[in-house]
Image (cartoon, rainbow, N blue to C red):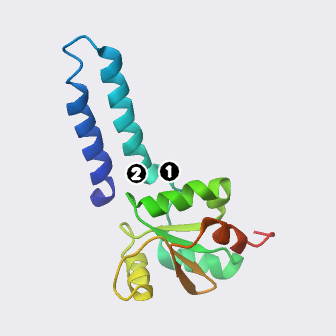
Amino acid sequence: MMRAWLLPMLLVLCGSAVATGPFPRGAHGAAAALMLVFVLLAGVNSSLVFPRSIGALEAQRRSAVDGRPVVFWRPGCMYCLRLRMRLGRTGRRLHWVDIWRDPAGAAVVRAANDGDETVPTVLVEGRPHVNPDPEWVREQLSPSA
């Protein structure tokens, strides 16, 4: 849990330190803008951008029932963020598993990637796909899903 929030907390702390520079010179607007940039970066690198994560076993069970892909991701991963942003609202229909919160999810990813925790790894019909094109992932959603 703490590992997932380490980068966002560091970004907010660094932003606070950087924003104090212009503050004593009376550049309150610049200080506020700098802090806002760091807070936005922290938000983008946190779990807040992604739909609520579920456990790997539950995600695979749900996927077997509804046929939707399972996405294994981790906070701070730019490729995961790219996938999430490019999927837009469609991304909420997928099953998301945060491998930093779920050891079983991390094990699935390591098994699919020769021991590496390479994300995003998308499981479609039991077959893993590493860092797939977002358009391809969107196509994997059945129209009835």
Task: Please tell me whether residue 105 is drawn above or below residue 74 in the rendered image.
Answer: below
Return the x and y of residue 30 as percentages of the image width and height: 33, 21
- Label 1 sits on what residue type? Val
- Write the residue at 33% across / 58% down: 4
Point out residue 131 in the picture as x, y percentages from the top left corner: 51, 72
User: Mark 2: which secondary structure?
Assistant: loop
Measuring from the top left, give residue 65's x and y in whole percent: 69, 79
**Measured along the vertical axis of the image, is residue 79 above or below residue 132?**
above
- In the figure, is residue 82 to the left or right of 35? right
Q: How far apart are marks 2 and 1 (CA)?
A: 7 Å
Give yes or no for contact between labels 2 and 1 (Cβ–Cβ under 8 Å). Answer: yes
Q: How many labels does the image show?
A: 2
* Position of residue 93 in the picture relative to residue 96 (left or right): right
Quarter of the image that includes the N terminus: bottom left
Q: Name the residue under label 1.
A: 49
The amino acid pointed to by label 2 is Ser
Numbered circle sitting on residue 46: 2
Q: Residue at x 18, y 14 (%)?
A: 24
Foreground residue among 137 and 93: 137
Residue 42 placed where, x, y %?
37, 44
Q: Residues within 10 Å of mark 1 (few under 14, many from 20)?
A: few
Label 1 sits on a secondary structure element that is helix
